[in-house]
């Protein structure tokens, strides 16, 4: 999570689920925790039983709302305004945790005078370049600090975008010997605290109510609950999920909560923090050890085609002089030793020159675009179902139909494997089976019970699952598939003289196998991930042991310690009744088995607990100790002050808890690492029925759009003519009874019978307005597509009044597709591909749509229906176009 | 006869007969104030008891697509959407609330199904619970109308091969919650209670559960929860109290439960006397007829 | 002796002897009922596992009988889940033992209208060849502007959030070596 990384230093949930029982107030927003994480939700219920206030803020009254002390209904897509209002409330009423904010956050830091705020520039920050559609983020830097010199395009800071950029790593710019200019009294007009205050001053309770569609009283209830349950004696926590991330400003949603938690002093403390709730068993793991284009294990940057240049520049650009990212080279070299063994040496720059390079965006939707262009020939899908799960399903399926070859690995034949004979486009006639060139290999996968391995759960915990039975027939683990695929390719290329095959030949690919199937040893791979001394093979026990001279190998530096003493720590299962509530001997959490990260902040600057009630980690006079593994150097005293020439962690003072940040502080204001804003600002969703009442700039100017792509047309918005064709807000979500795109649930009778059909949720008011019959059918449409769903009329999705206008919201679960025991249209077919610029995530949580009674047209008539409405809307818009002229302004100070 | 048939008494019928094998009476306390409506209980029950799928029909009734207890549904989560605040003091803002309740066989202290079963298929177990013995049940169905809650139900799916021919093409037997009798015998708690993420379904000795429920009721009443009440906890009610009872947040009928259930065999004793008299007359008549013919 | 047992097993006798005059208790117990035991007590082994659905990370215990998964339920020892599972996790056995699971390789040739059978070994060989050929035909040592590239833009890999860390590790390691940069997973959705 880049926003958590940018704010605090690490891209992971800051707390563990069980610790929610210690919260005095829990705000669940952008998450439907009771429905999507029911077993984790037991800890929220524990807190409620102990008297905590549980608040759910959501467009829909869900099973989570039913359990909450308070539900606040808001318009989908308005969360930053709501949370920004909370920030303003805290600041205007002087309810911030003064000692915490002054010592632990960057509130006192003075920002360069090149910075200009959205308040000054009507919705844009300084540095906007309308031609490139990007910001020069150097205008947001700390005063007195120069950006790190490096090659290439640096206008957006270090790293092109994405996870590593926001990881707080690569904390460039904060050079040692130049402590930031600060005003400890927080009075300087350009200090972060004052900028923050000005930035949010117009986010008043009245504005929040008018923009979000809640009441002033409801908003104030949340403000009071949060502020009254924060401080020395009390803590509050936030829980979020993809209800926050899937927006064109998704990263900034989370950032706003991060600001609140910093101002209230809730980070690193029991019952505090920000809990990111992930939807897949190992989605945290697949970011830590990424199957993502822009990072390598442990959030190390992938080399870039344009930036960085040679190895030295790359190292310089990525190594922070201060903080633990000061050891970037040790992490990097150790990874290359894990990948390429003796072939990676200091003399060949650890094979840097041969590594593949990425562009700014090679993310999944870029690939869809390239498929449609005919540039992608081969695709391997392992345990994902883009034909149903990805936004704008039609574009995804048409892309698959342009491939030369496709490999799909799954438990069942999912829609992404069967698109060539039963996709909606076959029905509409856009695709014809006989005309699709794609060669498809469906390979049956092994289930979790048929293989060894570890998942990293939502709280950074690596848990080992053991093989129970042998997979049947051709079913194989993905470990088997990729290992033997690599083995075969290496055998075929063993004698190649082509330079491009060099890395393939150098690859360390000698894992032991066992059994009749030649299954590779998952534990041997975990041991490689953990790391070892290259000379002796002895396992390492901590990332602090990693060296940059090739004497250590480590497959993922943040996972170093998971195989400490040669023992699989992830497989530890000491029952919870034999431990305290932290349960440190159950499995293993990164980093260093810490369960609450930044827990140095649970003590005051002198190292004493803020209160007896909320003690977690403290200084005992000689060392840090407590209930959790201290997230701090064990013997660094609270009064330690770095010398002028100190580097890496030595440059972090004893009262600065955020050790991954270059300045040891959490960031209220993010001077670099995010491409769209140093401070969260309310922008309307890409598609919304409203203008932005705060600024002339309507939506995030930096959002990624595909304005010229015929496959991704957009609805007219706000007061544009044609917007009335798509007048309603639509949001997608999940149900307890199903899982994501349904491949693991629509095939199970016991789950299918519990939610057997695709439906839409509408209010009685909308049903009356649109003529929808309860229990009947509705057709929901956008410029992309139209789907049908059964009509569930409910008061749980009430209309909201925004800017004096009543708007209706439509709720759509997105589990259905063409296959399985229960079938139905896919909500994601309605989605577009306007994305968050930091992480390239789609905005499926707030779009616009139209809705009509009855089933959708079939076959060719469906295409005609969608096209006719779209052309009607677009032609009206063209007759009276509405520009976004603000985006054409250049905003650098001259 | 009347002391054990049809009149409330403290102990469940048949339970005392176990002598040394008798176990403490166990049951469920289903606390709906913490039910999140996840339906883990429904699935856990089906996975453990290998119950067939019960039809893929969407009802449009909130999130309830199970609709009712039956031969193939032994736990059923009811969903009731209300415009009523959670608390009497008005907390809960918009006044919306969404009641969820996991229903189950009540394992009545005085169980009419037991009384009417002619085959001895329905029995009281040593744990004080009521089960159908599938190797005995012949599908006569007498128990179906006897249940005041509509729990007992015949299974209308294809007959498994091991069943005798008189079953026809369908299974036809009656199936219901066994309180996981086999698990109890092995010292495991019932599947639904074990799965329940929020401990809405609590399993244990009935005495303990009643104490826990009383404390819970007192706490929630004190906090002003709207409509909070216990249902089936009272041993003096029409079925002698439930082995599986509930804390509800509204009147039972709101959840589709009978407000004042009465054991349907309450008057069985008197009925049997009448029947005996009638039978005597009949036998005498038949005898006379035969005697007459001989002549 | 045998006769005595037989007579003792007669329901009417049991009703009287066991003080269960109305046959609502032990007198009516069938032998099957009397001998019933929970099937998990007969598992060949119990294997520690983790739920494969969401990221809460509930502990599971997998009961194995005769080489197949017989039952899955929550692991009470887990400090996160304390033995509890949601409906999806509780349905894990139905997931892994589902009759809808594919167990054989299926192959659709270009422009084909049906699935065909294919030997796994052959499929692996064909996939390896496809990667090698596509890669060779599309390899970029440099970008159009002359910047270093070392990659193929003609191959992509999708998925990872449902896989194990070790699997993701091999995917990333292999694709880096192959110059496949379009590697993505569910973190974008």
Image (cartoon, grey):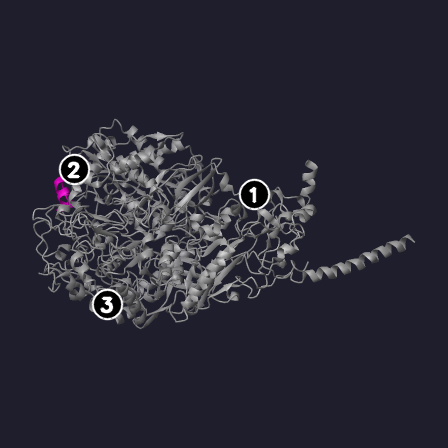
Q: Position of residue A302 (x, y in %)?
A: 21, 43
Give the chain of mark 2: A
Number of the front mark, 3 or 1: 1
Give the chain of mark 3: A
Looking at the image, is mark 2 or mark 3 earlier in the sequence?
Answer: 3
Distance between mark 3 and mark 1 Cα atoms:
64 Å
> Quick check: can you spot residue B86?
no
Label at residue A548:
2
Q: Which residue is mark 3?
A: A89
Label at residue A261:
none
Q: Which residue is mark 1?
A: C36
Reply above or below: A676 against A694.
Answer: above
In the picture, the quarter occupied by the C terminus of chain A is: bottom left
Residue appearing at x 52%, y 47% in the figure: B184
Left or right: residue A384 versus residue A254 is right
Residue nearest the observer in this picture, A9 or A403:
A9
Left or right: residue B27 versus residue C134 is right
Residue nearest the observer in this picture, B36 or A16:
A16
Residue at the farthest top position: A495
Left or right: residue A416 versus residue A718 is right
Q: Quadrant of residue A891?
A: bottom left
Give the chain of mark 1: C
SS for callout 3:
helix
Reply above or below: B134 against B251.
Answer: above
Distance between mark 2 and mark 3 Cα atoms:
48 Å
SS for callout 1:
loop
SS for callout 2:
loop
């Amino acid at each position: 999570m880049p926003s958590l990384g940018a704010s605090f230093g690490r891209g992971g949930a800051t707390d563990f689920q069980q610790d929610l029982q210690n919260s005095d107030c829990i705000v669940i927003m952008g998450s439907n925790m009771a429905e999507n994480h029911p077993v984790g939700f037991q800890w929220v219920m524990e807190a409620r039983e102990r008297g905590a206030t549980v608040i759910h803020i959501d467009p829909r009254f869900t099973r989570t709302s039913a359990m909450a002390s308070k539900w606040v209904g808001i318009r989908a897509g308005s969360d930053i305004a709501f949370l920004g209002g909370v920030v303003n409330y805290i600041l205007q009423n002087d309810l911030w945790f003064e000692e915490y904010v002054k010592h632990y956050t960057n509130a006192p830091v003075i920002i360069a005078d090149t910075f200009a705020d959205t308040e000054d520039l009507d919705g844009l920050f300084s540095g906007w370049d309308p031609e490139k559609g990007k910001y020069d983020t150097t205008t947001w830097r700390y005063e007195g600090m120069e950006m790190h010199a490096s090659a290439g395009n640096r206008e957006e800071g270090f790293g092109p975008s994405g996870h590593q950029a926001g990881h707080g790593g690569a904390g460039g710019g904060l050079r040692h010997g130049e402590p930031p200019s600060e005003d400890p009294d927080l009075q300087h007009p350009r200090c972060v605290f004052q900028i923050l205050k000005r930035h949010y001053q117009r986010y008043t309770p009245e504005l929040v109510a008018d923009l979000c569609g809640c009441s002033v009283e409801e908003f104030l209830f949340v403000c009071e609950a949060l502020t009254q349950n924060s401080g020395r004696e009390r803590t509050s926590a936030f829980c979020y999920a993809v209800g926050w991330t899937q927006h064109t400003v998704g990263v900034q949603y989370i950032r706003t909560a991060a600001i609140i938690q910093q101002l209230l002093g809730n980070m690193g403390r029991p019952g505090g923090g920000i809990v990111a709730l992930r939807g897949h068993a190992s989605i945290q793991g697949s970011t830590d050890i990424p199957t993502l284009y822009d990072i390598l294990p442990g959030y190390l940057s992938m080399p870039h085609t344009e930036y960085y240049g040679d190895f030295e520049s790359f190292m310089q650009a990525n190594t922070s002089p201060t903080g633990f990212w000061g050891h970037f080279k040790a992490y990097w070299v150790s990874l290359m030793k894990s990948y390429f063994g003796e072939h990676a040496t200091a003399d060949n720059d650890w094979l840097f020159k041969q590594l593949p390079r990425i562009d700014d965006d090679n993310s999944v939707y870029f690939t869809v675009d390239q498929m449609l262009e005919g540039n992608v020939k081969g695709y391997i899908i392992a345990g994902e179902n883009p034909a149903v799960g990805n936004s704008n399903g039609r574009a995804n399926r048409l892309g698959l139909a342009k491939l030369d070859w496709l490999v799909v690995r799954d438990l069942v034949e999912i829609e992404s494997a069967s698109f060539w004979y039963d996709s909606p486009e076959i029905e509409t006639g856009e695709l014809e089976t006989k005309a699709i060139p794609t060669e498809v290999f469906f390979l049956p996968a092994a289930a979790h019970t048929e293989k060894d391995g570890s998942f990293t759960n939502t709280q950074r915990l690596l848990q080992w699952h053991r093989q129970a039975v042998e997979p049947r027939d051709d079913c194989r683990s993905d470990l088997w598939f990729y290992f033997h695929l690599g083995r075969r390719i290496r055998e075929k290329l063993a004698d190649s003289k082509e330079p491009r095959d060099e890395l393939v030949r150098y690859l360390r690919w000698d894992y032991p196998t066992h059994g009749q199937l030649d299954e590779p040893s998952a534990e041997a791979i975990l041991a490689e991930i953990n790391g070892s001394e290259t000379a002796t093979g002895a396992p390492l026990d901590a990332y602090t042991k990693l060296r940059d001279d090739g004497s250590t190998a480590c497959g993922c530096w943040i996972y170093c310690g998971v195989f400490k003493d040669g023992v699989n720590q992830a497989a530890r299962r000491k029952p919870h009744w034999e431990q305290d509530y932290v349960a440190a001997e159950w499995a293993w959490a990164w980093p260093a088995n810490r369960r609450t990260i930044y827990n140095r902040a649970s003590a005051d600057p002198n190292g004493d607990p803020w209160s007896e009630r909320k003690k977690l980690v403290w200084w005992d006079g000689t060392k840090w100790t407590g209930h959790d593994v201290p997230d701090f150097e064990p013997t660094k005293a609270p009064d330690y002050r770095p010398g002028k020439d100190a580097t890496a962690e030595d440059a972090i003072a004893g009262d600065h808890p955020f050790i991954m940040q270059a300045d040891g502080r959490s960031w209220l204001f993010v001077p670099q690492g995010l491409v769209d804003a140093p401070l969260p600002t309310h922008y309307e969703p890409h598609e919304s029925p409203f203008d932005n009442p705060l600024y002339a700039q309507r939506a995030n100017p930096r959002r990624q759009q595909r304005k010229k792509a015929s496959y991704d047309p957009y609805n007219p918005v706000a007061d544009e003519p044609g917007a009335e064709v798509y007048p309603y807000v639509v949001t997608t979500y999940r149900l307890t009874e199903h899982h994501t795109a349904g491949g693991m649930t629509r095939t199970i009778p016991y789950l299918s019978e519990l939610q057997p059909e695709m439906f839409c949720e509408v209010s009685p008011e909308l049903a009356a307005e649109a003529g929808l019959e309860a229990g009947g059918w509705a057709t929901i449409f956008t410029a992309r597509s139209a789907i049908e769903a059964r009509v569930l009329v409910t008061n749980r999705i009430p209309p909201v009044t925004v800017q004096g206008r009543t708007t209706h919201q439509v709720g759509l679960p997105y589990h259905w597709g063409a296959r399985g025991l229960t079938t139905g249209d896919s909500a994601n077919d309605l989605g577009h591909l306007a994305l968050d610029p930091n992480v390239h995530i789609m905005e499926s949580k707030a779009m616009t749509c139209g809705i009509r009674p009855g089933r959708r047209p079939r076959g060719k008539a469906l295409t005609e229906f969608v096209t006719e409405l779209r052309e009607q809307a677009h032609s009206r818009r063209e007759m009276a176009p509405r520009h976004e002229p603000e985006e054409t302004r250049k905003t650098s100070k001259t | 006869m009347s002391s054990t048939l049809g009149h409330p008494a403290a102990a469940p019928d048949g339970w005392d007969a176990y002598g040394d094998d008798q176990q403490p009476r166990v049951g469920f306390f289903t606390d709906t104030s913490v039910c999140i409506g996840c339906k883990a209980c429904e699935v856990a029950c089906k996975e453990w008891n290998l119950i067939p799928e019960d039809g893929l029909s969407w009802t449009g009734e909130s999130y309830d697509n199970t609709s009712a207890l039956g031969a193939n549904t032994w736990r059923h989560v009811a969903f009731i959407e209300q415009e009523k605040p959670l608390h009497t003091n008005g907390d809960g803002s918009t006044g919306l609330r969404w009641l969820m309740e996991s229903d189950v066989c009540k394992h009545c202290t005085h169980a009419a199904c037991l009384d009417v079963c002619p085959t001895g298929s329905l029995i009281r177990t040593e744990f004080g619970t009521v089960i159908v013995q599938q190797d005995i049940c012949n599908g006569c169905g007498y128990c179906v109308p006897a249940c005041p809650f509509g729990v007992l139900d015949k299974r209308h799916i294809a007959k498994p091969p091991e069943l005798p021919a008189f079953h026809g093409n369908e299974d036809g037997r009656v199936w219901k919650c066994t309180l996981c009798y086999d698990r109890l015998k092995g010292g495991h708690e019932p599947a639904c209670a074990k799965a329940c993420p929020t401990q809405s379904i609590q399993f244990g000795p009935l005495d303990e559960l009643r104490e826990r429920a009383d404390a819970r009721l007192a706490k929630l009443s004190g906090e002003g929860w709207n409509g909070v009440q216990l249902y089936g906890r009272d041993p003096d009610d029409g079925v002698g109290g439930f082995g599986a009872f509930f804390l509800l947040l509204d009147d039972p009928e709101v959840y589709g439960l009978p407000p004042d259930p009465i054991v349907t065999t309450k008057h069985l004793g008197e009925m049997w006397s009448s029947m005996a008299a009638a039978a005597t007359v009949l036998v005498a008549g038949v005898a006379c007829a035969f005697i007459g013919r001989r002549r | 002796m045998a006769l005595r047992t037989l007579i003792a097993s007669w329901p009417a006798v049991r009703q009287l002897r066991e003080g269960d005059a109305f046959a609502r208790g032990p007198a009516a117990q069938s032998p099957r009922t009397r001998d019933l035991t929970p099937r998990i007590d007969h598992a060949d082994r119990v294997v520690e596992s983790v739920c494969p659905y969401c990221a809460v990370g509930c502990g599971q215990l997998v009961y194995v009988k005769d080489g197949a998964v017989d039952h899955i339920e929550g692991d009470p020892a887990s400090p996160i889940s304390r033995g509890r599972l949601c409906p999806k996790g509780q349905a894990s056995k139905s997931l892994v033992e589902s009759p809808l699971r594919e167990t054989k390789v299926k192959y659709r040739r270009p422009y084909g209208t049906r699935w065909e059978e294919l030997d796994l070994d052959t499929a692996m060989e064909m996939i390896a060849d496809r990667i090698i050929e596509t890669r060779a035909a599309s390899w970029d040592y440099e970008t159009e502007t002359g910047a270093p590239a070392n990659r193929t833009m003609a191959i992509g890999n999708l998925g990872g959030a449902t896989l194990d860390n070790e699997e993701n590790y091999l995917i990333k390691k292999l694709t880096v070596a192959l110059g496949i940069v379009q590697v993505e997973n569910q973190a974008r959705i």
